[in-house]
Structures are given as structure tokens and as C-alpha cells.
Amino acid sequence: MPHWDTVLAFTFPGQGSQRSGMGRPWVEHPSWEVVGEASAAVGRDVERLLLDAPMDELTRTANAQLATFVQSLVVLDAVERVGLSPAACAGHSLGEYTALVASGALPFADGALLVVARGEAMARAGEDAPGTMAALIGINDDDAEAACHRAEGEAWVANYNAQGQVVVAGTSDAIAAVSEIARELGARKVLPLAVSGAFHTPLMAGARPALRKALGDAVFAAPEIPVVANVDARVHSDPADWPSLLSAQLCGPVRWRQTIETLSGLGATTFVEVGPGGVLTGLARRIAPELQALSVAKPDDLDALLDAVAGHPADAWGDEGHAHQGEHLYMSERVVVSPCSGIFAPEESLAAPGTGLLPGTAGHGEGGGSSAVRIGDRVGRVGVTEVRTPFAGEVVRWLSVAGERVQEGQPLVWLRVVDEAR
């Protein structure tokens, strides 16, 4: 039976996680429709970016941010279709916009338009005030800050990523000086980053007017789940806070280590990186090694995510947090999804095991229904269409309730499957 005390926190990656052709594994998945919606919202061919753009084109700031944002939302849509949702979320830099869309604080179209405006504004700012970034490995926060001060130039800490990993940014000369001082202070490695500007520093101030204008046109709502902000690693539930937080994020450091610590303090037990790459998964494992961290970037990762939530994570995930091929074949839990859109009417004779609760009761009242189903049994109707299970097993949890309007592919019921041949 799934471990329902598992508390998921979704994290969303930022610029630098994009890869050429990263959308290709998702083309046949129902969640690919998100790409068409994004293209219509921003007036650009996002599908070509995700499928055919070479890395030199995809690395350009405006393209990288839009592509990463949309790819992450494709993956999020797929995760939601299997019935999983987070208790809290956060995003690294650009990923903060994805987190706000995921939380319901920002409409999808508004988020996409903001990401376009942000990417274009940051690209222009990088041309007007050239700069660079570098990752310092094996150095603590205080020494990284000291190295920036001692360089006596335009250099700042841009990302507090994890224990022993700090990103600095500034002018090329200043970052060269910071790198030398950091080595003297014990940094094991200095890794220059291939970026078009000194992000999250005062050198990005030129991007603020355009972003503020775009933020003024967006409609923010109160997040439906807690979202932890980059600027102060705190939860902000007032929608009026977010425009100023996103503006401040341009020129202020991303406090990612503190953000993960805040999510952990909120009760998160599993960090799920939703989108391309696996950088945030590695950081979460370093920041909170006692908790589970994994990444969903490909359709094959979905079943293993369900397996991990069901309480079988040990062998399902590789070193980078991605699912091993074929591991999902041994899952013991499955969801039955809706074959069409319409009003859901669950089979009244079914109940979750050990509770006596019938579908749609939401924890109220009692009944004497059975929890067992065989392959082909009806679990309900959507409109006039019968919903029959392709699996045999027991009802673990109802994911939709009687009278709810559901969409095609929406999860209806979670089963613990059994082998009918036994």
C-alpha cells in the first residue's frame, strides 16, 4: 500500500538544464499538448525549440528560459495525470516562474509571457553590462562572500546552491580575481559557467524596467500550495508580494540551500525535480541527505516516481535520480484514468480497503462495499462511457469523487494490483 505520509515537494530547474531534443521523448504523450498552448500564448514555435534547435541556439538566454519553462510544465502535467501533487514547491531562478504556475499563483499564459519578457530583458542587460559567472566548489558561504569583497571589483555571490557550492558573478576581471582568492581560501575547483551575463547581481539592473512592466500586466493569485521564494527562502501567500519578489530576484542571490531547508521544515520528505536535467536533485541530496530526492525528466520516470511514493524507492532510481529502464514493470500500484471528459460517477459498490468508505464520501459516512476488482471490471462511468480497469487489485484511494468533472487522462482511482493467475 502507498505510504500516504510521504510529503512531496516539487522543484523546478532553471536556465542551464536545457538540452537539444529534450522534448522528443514526450511527443506521443498526452501532456505534449502543453507545447501547443505555449506556442499560441507567446507567438513562437516552441515545439521546434524543444525538438530541433541545436545547442548553440538553445543556449541563448531568451530561448533557454522559454524552452526550460515549457518543458518543465509538460513534465508537471504528466505527473499530475498520474494523480500526484506537491505539498509545497520552489524553483531555481527561472524555475520560480514555473513553480508559481504550478501552484496556481500565475496563469499559464501570463507565466509564459513573463518568461519571454524576462529572457529578452536579461539578454539585453548582458549585452549592455557584460559579465560572467563561476561555480566555486569546496568553499563555504562566508569565504565565497569574502573572496568577492577582497576582489575589490564588481563581483557578488549569485547562488547559494548547497554546502560547499556557491556561484559568483560579476565582470570578467572581477570574477578572475575572485577565482584566485577563492582557491587561496580552500576552494577545490572553480568552474566557469557558459552564460551571457552576470545573473542575480546588480549588473542585471538594466533588465528591471522591462520585467516590471511585464509583471504589471500579469495577474497573480494566492498560491494554492506554499511557494518558497528565492530572495528570502520564505513562503509568501499574498499575491501582491510576488511581482516585487520576482523583480528583486533579477539582481539578488538565489538562496537555494536555504530554500530546500525551508521546504524540509514544512515537512517535505521527498524532493521531486520536475523538468529537464537533474541538477536540483543532486543539490537536494547534498543539502538534505536524510531525505529522498529524485528527478522526473522522461516518461519512463513516471512509473518509478509512483513506485517511490508507494514505498519502494531503494532500487528504482539511478545515481542521477532518474528511473532505471524497465524498473516500472515491477510496480505494485497503478492508476485507472478517464477515457474521456465528463462527469465522473464511481462504481458505488467499491470502497477503499479497511475503511468501508464508498467513493465520493471524502471520509464521511460508512458503507459495506468491496475493494476488490478484476481485469475488465467497471470502476465507474464518465458521462455515458463505462470505465473498466485493465488491472486486477484492490482500491487504495479514490482520486476523483462523484459528480466531479474530469478530463481525458485524469486519474480516477489508485489500485494495488495483483496477479490474477495466482
Image (cartoon, rainbow, N blue to C red):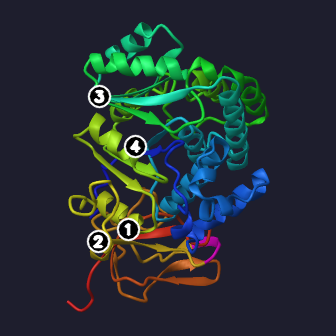
Q: Which mark is residue 327?
A: 2
Q: Which residue is mark 1?
A: 303
Sequence order check, earlier mark of 3 and 4: 3
Sequence order check, earlier mark of 1 and 2: 1
Q: Could you tell me if the residues under marks 1 and 2 are in contact, i.e. CB atoms within 8 Å?
A: yes
Q: How far across and down, in percent of the image, does residue 135 sit?
A: 40, 31
Left or right for 125, reference 135: right
Above or below, 228 against 408 in this view is above
Q: Nearer the viewer, residue 193 or 361?
A: 193
State which mark lies toward you, 1 or 3. Answer: 3
State which mark lies toward you, 4 or 1. Answer: 4
Q: Disc 4 to disc 2, how far (Cα)?
A: 23 Å
Q: Which mark is residue 280?
A: 4
Sequence order check, earlier mark of 2 and 3: 3
| Circle 1 SS class | helix
**342 in magenta:** yes
Q: Disc 1 to disc 3, how far (Cα)?
A: 33 Å
Q: Which residue is mark 3?
A: 164
Q: Which residues are magenta?
A: 340-344
**44 in magenta:** no
